Image: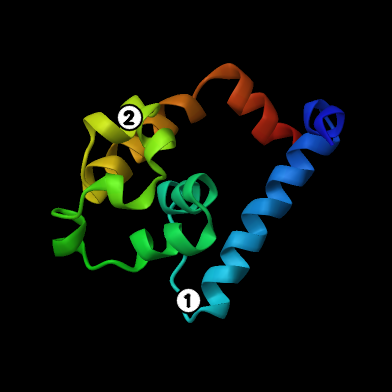
Amino acid sequence: MHAMVLDIDVGPMLQTHKLLTSVLFARAKGYSRPLTAAELEMMNLTGDGTGLDMVTMPQAMREQVPTSNFFQRGGYERNPVAIRHNTVAKLLAVTDERMDVNSGKPGARELAAAF
């Protein structure tokens, strides 16, 4: 499987399929609004169920709930982004911002053009 993930043709298809299963999971759980890129990334990063808990949380709660509630301790302690941006709202905001910045880089634009 690792060789397939590194393959330029198959790897993006596998990742796309994984993200699609997250969208389908959210829909199956009754969440019909389109997911933002950051929300989809949280589902990818923390697992569909845990990520959906972050996504479906009311905005007022996102401002208060610590990100540590959504990660296993070892993973959280090795994730400086989640530690520094220690509420759900802050983590989603910084993820959106970084995705916006990185999507403008040459490699990301080339990949988008290929698909």
What label sits on residue 32 in the rendered view? 1
Instruction: Choose top left, top right, bottom left or bottom right for residue 92.
Output: top left
Q: Do the residues labelled 2 and 1 touch (CB within 8 Å)?
A: no
Instruction: Choose top left, top right, bottom left or bottom right for residue 61.
Output: bottom left
Image side of residue 50 versus residue 19, left or right: left
Crowding near the residue tagged with mark 1, few <14, some 14–19, many ≥20 C-alpha atoms within 10 Å: few
| x and y percentages locating residue 47 in the rendered image | 52, 54
Does residue 16 lie above or below 11 as drawn? below
Q: What secondary structure is marked by label 2?
A: helix
| x and y percentages locating residue 20 in the rendered image | 65, 59
Which amino acid lies under the numbered mark 1 shown in the image of this protein? Ser
Image side of residue 101 versus residue 91, left or right: right
Q: Which color mode does the image show?
A: rainbow
In the picture, which quadrant includes the C terminus? top right
| x and y percentages locating residue 98 in the rendered image | 38, 30
Crowding near the residue tagged with mark 2, few <14, some 14–19, many ≥20 C-alpha atoms within 10 Å: some
Q: Residue at x 75, y 33 (%)?
A: 114
Does residue 55 lie above or below 6 as drawn? below
Q: Residue at x 74, y 38 (%)?
A: 12
Along the viewing direction, whichever of 102 and 57 lies nearer the viewer: 57
Image side of residue 45 versus residue 106, left or right: left
> Would you name the residue on which mark 2 appears?
81
